[in-house]
Amino acid sequence: MTVLLVEDDMSIAIVITAALQDEGFAVVHCQTLAERDQQLATRGFAALVTDVMLPDGDGIETIERVRALHPQMPIVILSAQNTLDTAVRATDTGAFEYFPKPFDIDELARTVRQAAGAAQGQAADDEPVADGLPLVGRSAAMQSVFRMITRVLRNDLTVLILGESGTGKELVAEAIHQLGNRRAGPFIAVNTAAIPAELIESELFGHEKGAFTGAVARHVGKFEQAAGGTLFLDEIGDMPMQAQTRLLRALQSGTVRRVGGREEIRLDTRIVAATNKDLEPEIAAGRFREDLYYRLNVVPIHMPPLRDRRDDIDVLARHFLQHAANEGLPRRQLTAEAAELLSRQPWRGNVRELKNFIYRLALLAREDVIDADSIVPLLTQETAQAAAENDAAPQAFDIATAVAQWLSSHRPASGTIYDSAMAAFERPLFAEVLRETAGNQLRAAQALGINRNTLRKRLGELALDPEEFTRRP
């Protein structure tokens, strides 16, 4: 079997060719769309592997020409344009798979093998794709999210979005709606934690006139309002148990009944739920129904915290500066040093906190080009404000304040701040964990959430001897 590879970067093409040949494929390589079309005009291939940005055009925009010649040929798309829009465009072509660069070469080779065996080739969807979605990220963690989103766009499977507050769970829900089969219908978002327990059933399922004191007219609930579209149930982990029971029944039967009503109303609504809680401990504690969890957790999407996608902080910050300018705030730019400083901050409020900070920065900065020295005072002000807000709990420790204080008095030479800070932080951290675990390296590694071999390596680098922390009678 022969694969057609369209890639203008020769170093990448060589690596891909070798991997595909190891899988038993012959490979025909070309560097432009024109060369690709010449090859496809004369013969078929087991699969097409193509880059997006090529010297003579966009590889995705020209897939229609490929489909016209070889409708059953599976297509695998590669791209350095690591955005949700690119992932969705690739999926909308009916591509077998989409790989953001850099990718795992072995995984690519296996996927091409699967594609060639499956001989897939779905027809492209001619409907327009939503543009300008606010989800941004080049990190591997966000690319995984983008790929999961593309997998649920052409079906109505229930999705459960998991992640800390501020990570963008509602943005994911909106993207699934805007890009999916139900984009012509309404998107109804409900924060289940913000509705009083005694009103949540009425809000979700509606009520009939006279159903309870104050029910002076029929009320159509959120499920009915979302007919033909998507119902987004945010903070589902905080839903009262009685409402959980009603929600489970609705999901199982595909119908709802208004409070005080007898009519069973057939549902035509996609359900997307989200929570910042770990639901399994909630189930164990009897605060969340296990059967409801499995009903909701058909397709889980895990939103990573910003600390796990620091590579995205630069692009997010510049993205928010552009949005701030579009909304009338002064147009600003970040220097590389300023972006690096931002990427090292804790951002406990995740993307939401970063966005709010960038908007304040756009408003308060004195220069159009913002350098690191311009950011430090505002960061210090932020940590001082957080400390003031925590005066009611004086025993609480604010690590962001501690970092700011350390940086102000121990700032090393440029380029070594991160290494110096990590060394200053890791040694007392590891020492304290070893003290708590009596020098047991396995328990210490588990407490830290790292591999035991990694712990041993870092202990050696930090000159920490676990034996010193062993408690002896």
Image: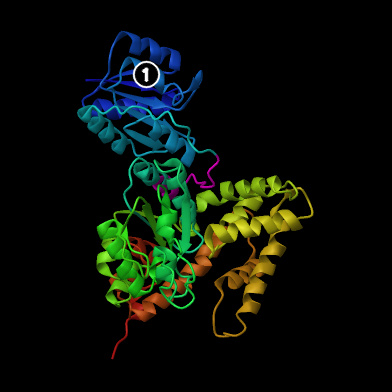
Specify whether residue 144 is painted magenta: yes
Q: Is residue 358 in view?
A: yes
Q: Please provide percent x and percent y for residue 470.
A: 32, 81
Q: Residue at x 44, y 41 (%)?
A: 179
Q: Residue at x 64, y 59 (%)?
A: 357
Pointer 1 local density, CA inside 10 Å: few below 14, some 14–19, many at least 20: some
Residue that mark 1 sits on: 66
Quarter-of-image position of residue 126: top left
* Name of the residue lying farthest toward the top: 42
The answer to which of 277 and 216 lies nearer the viewer is 216
Q: Secondary structure at mark 1?
A: helix
Please name the colour scheme applied to the rendered image.
Answer: rainbow
Determine whether, in the image, residue 176 is placed left or right of residue 280.
right
- Residue 4 in the image: state x and y as whole percent: 32, 20
Residue 57 placement, left or right of 324: left
Q: Is residue 452 in view from this perspective?
A: no
Q: Is residue 469 magenta?
A: no
Q: Residue at x 48, y 38 (%)?
A: 85
Expressed as whole percent of the image width and height from the top left, the position of residue 455 reads 36, 65
Which residue type does callout 1 highlight?
Val
Residue 463 place in picture, x, y as percent: 42, 68
Q: Quadrant of the C terminus?
A: bottom left
In-front residue for pair 156/72: 156
Residue ranking furthest to the right: 366
Whether residue 472 sits left or right of residue 130 in the image: it is: left
Q: What span is in magenta?
A: 132-145
Against 103, residue 337 (above or below) is: below
Does 98 sit above or below residue 351?
above
Q: Quadrant of residue 308?
A: bottom left
Which quadrant: the N terminus?
Answer: top left
**Eyeballing the image, is 267 above or below 34?**
below
